[in-house]
Image: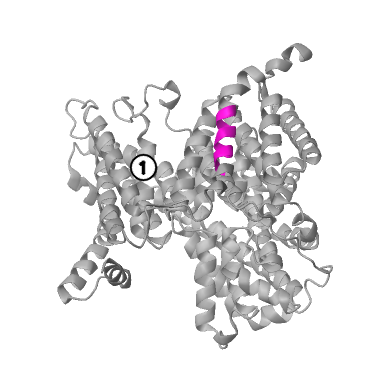
């Protein structure tokens, strides 16, 4: 997904303005010339300047490079969206559903999408999730949430 | 007694050697699978090594990366698809050799040259790091401030074709480093009121996001699997390699030296070392016309170079806490989390740890020869694993790894945000390495500046008062001003600033 440099530059300028304005509210330490705001301000200025250069160079190539170049069929990004959705799903569901069901849904779902073959995908997903659970929960003592499986375990 | 003798039993015991063997197998697998990089291997190892003692933890990372960089050559030679970016420079050449029936020879040469390059880089590391640490003991905040500046500047110029995009990436990294309570007054900056951000952007989840999840996103864009290679048994791996090494010994020396040097430079690692070495090998070759047709000479140089760079990157990392590449950036982050701040004091306080790293490097590069040999034999089978199976598994490991660091779901949120950020950056030609360096060096840059200014009572000229600081400072300013001066000079001379800009003018018309 190639964005025109001007678009990225504009985003950087907006971001630098927000970050810079926020930095001005950081308090000064009395008796010192340099405080919490110094580095954020320098970085904001840097982002603003580099963003402006990107806008200029992007506008020069305006005709050659479209605003957004997907570089192929937009359908390809469904997979990327699914990866993002999987992470969001984990954050939202793992505490209540538990690690094993959540991870199984994620791995099995992605396998089905990427390669089809339902039976082997489900077997691979189950094996992976149980192996990862064993390694992290039992050997590395990471308290992965049990969720709905809790009554079965304890 | 020399501390290296204290270090030997720390490494040469059953536990550490077992960890190293497991890490080696992991590294060979990761390197061999296209799309999984040596940096990703390190990022995925972190959550596991997090629970180990320092020596086995670092030995595991050293071993896994050395193996992964060589293993990247396997799919390069067999499928023309580099397994890691460090093999990209000569994947086409190695594949051309395979098509001529010389695939075994290409891989055998790459294996031996990798081991030699790694050993040369390690020797340089062992000899130079303690000496540099003696010098670094004299350094104060003023020198460290300039060193951090030099490292960051270097990252912008060497990591990418476009210094502008490198600079943007660096600024993004530096910005992310400012998130959290600030060093002087403890004021929360850019935390959005989220308590999890008060300590800053958690480093390990950020690495996992930028190197593992972004890579997954990039790879699931193409759903087609790489075709499985049809190969005969690779049994005669070392046939003819002795003659090649004798014939091109200068290439090994050159590749190892360049690789080590590039590795030391912050922001540049094995991939850039291999490109530079391949190009120089061609330039100095007696038969440059053979390059690209399945000629082994460039593989000698570049194969030695990328493994040498791996060791070279540890020099600035251990001595100054400035990472030489993305892998050592992760290692430094881990050392900080473990409360062992890299820098010259670590050479005095825990020399056995430093020498343990050195011993691990030697063992890893020596073990590369037998294990690499086995990997060449097994490559056919590893490469048959469909890649579509790999991505969901790596994603799950990324999630659990980020969660395991402090048992907090916020780590997974950071993985997500940083993964999307790195994906968008790389898709648009912004290199990720400078951002990582900014994230690691940001606190060092700001912390040293603030302490120095408190010491000097706000007098900026103090940054030039100590001799080494003055030299470093002038050097940094020169590097910053040179591009501007040369642009101004070209402007005065009335020539176009660069071929690209004249092309752009044509486009505009």
Quadrant of the rendered image containing residue A11:
top left
A13 sits to left or right of B117: left
Q: Main secondary structure of the magenta part?
A: helix
Residue at 32% x, 39% y is B446
Seen from the viewer's position, the closer of residues A1 and B375 is: A1
Q: Is residue A84 magenta?
A: yes
Above or below: residue A146 compared with residue B46: above
Q: Position of residue B354 (x, y in %)?
A: 57, 47
Q: Position of residue B126 (x, y in %)?
A: 56, 57
Quadrant of the rendered image containing residue A61:
bottom left
Whether residue B340 is visible, yes or no, is no
Above or below: residue A80 compared with residue B381: above
Q: Quadrant of the C terminus of chain B?
A: bottom left
Whether residue B170 is visible, yes or no, is yes
- Label 1 marks a residue whose chain is B
Above or below: residue B365 compared with residue B461: below
B19 sits to left or right of B171: right
Residue at 25% x, 33% y is A37
Q: Which residue is identified by label 1?
A: B174
B191 sits to left or right of B118: left
Seen from the viewer's position, the closer of residues A14 and A42 is: A14
B411 sits to left or right of A20: right
Q: Position of residue B390 (x, y in %)?
A: 69, 46
Report the span colored magenta.
Answer: A80-89
Q: Is residue B28 magenta?
A: no
Residue at 58% x, 39% y is A83
Crowd around label 1: few <14 · some 14–19 · many ≥20 (10 Å): many
Q: Position of residue B379 (x, y in %)?
A: 76, 60
Name the colouring of the figure. Answer: one colour
């Amino acid at each position: 997904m190639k964005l025109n440099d001007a678009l990225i530059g504009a985003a950087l300028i907006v971001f630098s303005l927000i970050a810079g304005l926020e930095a001005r509210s950081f308090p000064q330490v009395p008796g010192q010339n340099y405080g919490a705001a110094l580095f954020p301000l320098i970085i904001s200025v840097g982002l603003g300047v580099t963003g402006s250069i990107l806008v200029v160079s992007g506008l020069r190539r305006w005709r050659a490079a479209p605003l957004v170049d997907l570089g192929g069929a937009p359908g390809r990004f469904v997979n990327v969206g699914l990866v993002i959705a999987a992470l969001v799903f984990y954050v939202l569901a793992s505490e209540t559903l538990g690690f094993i069901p959540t991870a199984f849904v994620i791995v099995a779902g992605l396998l089905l999408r990427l390669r089809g073959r339902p039976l082997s995908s489900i077997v691979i997903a189950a094996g992976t999730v149980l192996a990862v659970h064993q390694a992290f929960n039992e050997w590395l003592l990471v308290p992965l949430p049990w969720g709905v499986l809790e009554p079965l375990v304890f | 007694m020399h501390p290296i003798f204290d270090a030997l039993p720390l490494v040469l015991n059953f536990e550490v050697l077992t960890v190293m063997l497991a890490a080696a197998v992991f590294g060979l697998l990761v390197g061999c699978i296209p799309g999984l990089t040596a940096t990703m291997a390190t990022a995925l190892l972190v959550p596991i090594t997090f629970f180990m003692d320092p020596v086995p933890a670092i030995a595991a990372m050293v071993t896994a990366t050395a193996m992964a960089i060589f293993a990247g050559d396997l799919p390069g030679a067999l499928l023309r698809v580099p397994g890691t970016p460090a093999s990209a420079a000569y994947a086409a050449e190695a594949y051309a050799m395979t098509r001529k029936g010389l695939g075994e020879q290409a891989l055998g040469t790459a294996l031996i040259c990798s081991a030699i390059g790694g050993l040369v880089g390690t020797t340089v590391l062992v000899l130079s790091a303690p000496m540099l640490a003696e010098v670094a003991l004299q350094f104060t905040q003023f020198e460290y401030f300039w060193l951090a500046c030099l490292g960051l500047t270097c990252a912008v110029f060497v990591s990418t074709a476009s210094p502008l995009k490198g600079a943007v990436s660096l600024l993004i990294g530096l910005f992310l480093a400012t998130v959290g309570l600030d060093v002087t007054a403890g004021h929360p900056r850019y935390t959005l009121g989220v308590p999890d951000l008060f300590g800053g952007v958690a480093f390990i989840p950020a690495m996992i996001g930028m190197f593992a999840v972004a890579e997954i996103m990039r790879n699931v864009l193409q759903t087609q699997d790489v075709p499985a290679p049809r190969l005969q048994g690779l049994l005669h791996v070392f046939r003819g390699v002795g003659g090649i090494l004798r014939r091109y010994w200068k290439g090994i020396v050159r590749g190892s030296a360049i690789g080590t040097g590039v590795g030391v430079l912050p922001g540049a690692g094995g991939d850039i070392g291999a490109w530079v070495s391949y190009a120089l090998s061609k330039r100095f070759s007696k038969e440059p016309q053979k390059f690209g047709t399945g000629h082994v000479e460039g593989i000698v140089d570049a194969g030695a170079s990328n493994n040498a760079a791996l060791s070279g990157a540890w020099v600035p990392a251990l001595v100054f806490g400035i990472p030489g590449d993305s892998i050592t950036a992760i290692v430094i982050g881990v050392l900080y989390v473990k409360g062992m701040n890299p820098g010259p004091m670590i050479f005095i306080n825990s020399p056995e740890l430093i020498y343990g790293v050195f011993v691990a490097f030697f063992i890893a590069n020596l073990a590369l020869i037998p294990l690499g040999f086995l990997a060449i034999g097994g490559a056919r089978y590893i490469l048959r694993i469909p890649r579509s199976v790999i991505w969901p598994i790596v994603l799950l490991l990324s999630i659990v790894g980020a969660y395991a660091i402090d048992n907090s779901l916020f780590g997974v949120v950071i993985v997500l945000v940083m993964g999307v950020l790195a994906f968008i950056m790389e898709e648009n030609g912004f290199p990720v390495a400078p951002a990582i360096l900014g994230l690691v060096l940001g606190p060092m840059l700001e912390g040293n500046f603030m302490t120095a200014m408190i010491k000097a009572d706000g007098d900026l000229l103090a940054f030039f008062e100590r001799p080494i600081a003055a030299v470093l400072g002038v050097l940094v300013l020169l590097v910053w001003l040179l591009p501007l001066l040369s642009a101004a000079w070209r402007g005065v001379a009335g020539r176009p600033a660069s071929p690209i800009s004249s092309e752009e003018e044509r486009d505009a018309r």
